[in-house]
Image (cartoon, grey):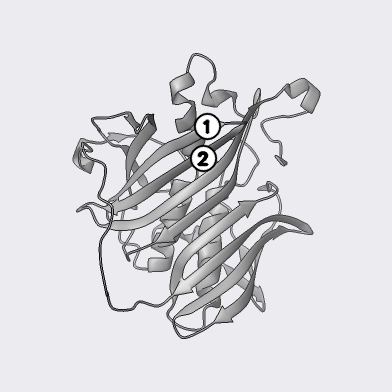
Amino acid sequence: MNEELRLLELTSIGEGRYSAPMPAGSQEGRDVIFGGQLIAQMIMASKLNASDDKYVKSIQTIFSRAGTYGQPLELQVEPFHDGRTFGSSIITAWQGERLLSKSMVLSTADEADLISHQVVPPAGVKGPKFGKPTKGTEFPGAELLEAEAEFDTINGVPAMSLWMRMPETVGSYAASQAVLAWSTNGWLIGLAMQPYAEQIQIGDAHHTLSTGVIGHTLHFHRQFDAGSWVHIAQEASFAGKGRVHGRGAAFSEDGLLLATFSQDSMLKQIDAKVAGSSPDSRTWM
């Protein structure tokens, strides 16, 4: 097993309650738990708590408070429906008595196609062999490439594509979902800033800019293994009123739609001295 995948190994500490491991360090360089980590580990908690072979169809997460790497993280699963085809639950992330976030999870079992179609990947994106190695908020240990594309906007808004894979076969659909979920959460705020590079920079985040993901939703459509290349295409669909909204899709290397996602975030200017803010600020709402 890839060592980083141990971040997805939760420990049962009670009925529907799990202790979640922490990474060795912060990808963002500050003591705030990355939201993608919470979503990924919630997906694993849902799978561990399932009574059958259902898998996560969608997960909708609201981040109400930021967490710290310096305290234990626990996840509580509260099922409220478990049928033959569908199941649902609420998963809450806690640090002590401090509630960090909640997810609503819809689980499902596969059924036969009645009809079948999908959106296609954006045109003009070259395959991973043309990609440029980059780093960001991908799942730890994943290989990440910035895709060579013939565009930097789609429908008038900033857009980008990435190629991502783990260095070896993951072997678990739930873990592959978690790897992808982690890797979709950290790009859209910075993408929204790109047309305004003379005014603001992503490096200003948590200094003179107050930024944070408020809600992130993923829908999974086809099973895949994150040890194969996944094309993550995304666009910052709206920016205004101190908010950013973005959306994206994940495709296999041969163009099959694997997942779609959307995100609501905060992006506004602050006076760090007045607000008492710092790069390690743990509250954004």
Rendered residue at 33%/41% (across/down):
162
Going by the image, does 135 lie left or right of 270? left
Return the x and y of residue 253 as percentages of the image width and height.
22, 51
Return the x and y of residue 56 as percentages of the image width and height.
46, 68
For the residue marked with disc 2, what is the amino acid? His
Return the x and y of residue 243 as percentages of the image width and height.
59, 35
Rendered residue at 20%/42% (across/down):
127
Element carrying mark 2: strand
Q: Is 168 drawn above or below residue 46 in the view shown?
A: above
Are circles 1 and 2 on residues that touch, CB within 8 Å? yes
Q: Residue furthest top?
A: 198
Residue 34: which numbered mark, if any? none
Q: How many residues crowd around disc 2 within 10 Å: few (fewer than 14), some, or many (20 or more)? A: many
Q: Is 207 drawn above or below residue 265 in the view shown?
A: above
Which quadrant of the rendered structure holds the N terminus?
A: bottom left
Which quadrant of the rendered structure holds the C terminus?
A: top right
In the picture of the structure, the residue carrying the numbered disc 2 is 245
In the picture of the structure, the residue carrying the numbered disc 1 is 239
